[in-house]
Amino acid sequence: MADQSILSAFILGVIEGITEFLPISSTGHLIIAEQWLGARSDTFNIVIQAGAIIAVTIIYWRRLLNLVLGWREPENRDYALKLIVAFLITAVLGLTVKKLGFELPEDASPIAWALIIGGVWMIFAEWAAAKRPQSTTITWPVAILVGIAQVVAGVFPGTSRSGATIFVAMLAGTGNRAAATEFAFLVGIPTMYAASAYQLLKTLKDQGVAGEDWTSLGVAFVTSTIVAFIAVKWLLSYIQTNRFTVFAVYRIILGAILLGFASFGMIH
């Protein structure tokens, strides 16, 4: 059983690492995967997400350091302020949603529909953005809408935080895929650290860590970190010359398959 638990943890770590920053929804994939591999504790889910955040922080460490050390430069200061505002919007709205007692759905059907609708939305966003000049500028409307999009993605598993923020940025005026992706990922770093810390402290306060399988958790954490690093590096290279269409098609196909599985009772 121990070996099986470690294998399951490894698989979940791989899934988290691949899906956290690709626009295909990590939460949706993990919720479905846990129906077959067994549900994991809140602490486990928080820790493997932390692994993915650490990976993307490593990738962007020079950019982050440049924003901090180059604060006096108007361009850096403007960009950093927009990151901060987007984060604060997410934090305030996210806490409001938490206070209202919102719980993530665990059924496959709403996740499947979110995957399909999100896929169609991505195709439309690519098409609409292609008709505009290739601007790399992050405007204030882009920053505000990205902050809101992060909360919407958190409320509807299957939406994808990265997908929602990237394509909102593209539709709001940052038509360049690389520029939109960078801003979306940089906003995601403090957002995900804060959300993970908040949830971890709440979990430790309410449940503690009694009975936690630390070996499996460690395996999942390391796996998530390594796989996320590779996945993000690949994505940043891929989007230089390719559209996001392949991810949109994948989402639509996966959503349709999940609806089929649900209708036959193979998942709930």
Image (cartoon, rainbow, N blue to C red):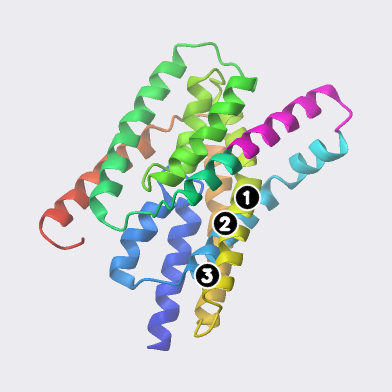
Question: To which residue does mark 3 refer?
Answer: 43
The mark that comes first in sequence, 2 or 3, is 3
Question: Is 84 left or right of 35, judged from the image as shown?
Answer: right
Q: How crowded is the residue under tag 1: few (<14 C-alpha within 10 Å), some, or many (20+)?
A: many
Label 3, secondary structure: give it.
Answer: helix
Label 1, secondary structure: give it.
Answer: helix
The mark that comes first in sequence, 1 or 3, is 3
In this view, the residue farthest toward the bottom is 1
- Quadrant in the picture for the C terminus: bottom left
Q: Residue at x 80, y 28 (%)?
A: 77
**Mark linked to residue 56:** 1
Q: Residue at x 53, y 84 (%)?
A: 210
Front of the two marks 2 and 3: 3
Q: Residue at x 55, y 17 (%)?
A: 173
Tell me how far mark 2 sits from mark 3, CA to CA: 15 Å
Q: Are marks 2 and 1 in contact (CB under 8 Å)?
A: yes
Question: To which residue does mark 2 refer?
Answer: 52
The quadrant holding residue 85 is: top right
The quadrant holding residue 4 is: bottom left
Give, as a three-letter code, the residue at label 3: Thr
Rendered view: 12 above or below 27 = below
The main secondary structure of the magenta stretch is helix
Q: Magenta segment, which residues? A: 71-89
Give, as a three-letter code, the residue at label 1: Val
Tell me how far mark 2 sits from mark 1, CA to CA: 7 Å
Q: Nearer the viewer, residue 211 or 135?
A: 211
Q: Does any portion of residue 122 appear in the rendered image?
A: yes
The quadrant holding residue 23 is: top left
Q: Position of residue 232 (x, y in %)?
A: 56, 47
Q: Position of residue 66 (x, y in %)?
A: 81, 38
Q: How crowded is the residue under tag 3: few (<14 C-alpha within 10 Å), some, or many (20+)?
A: many
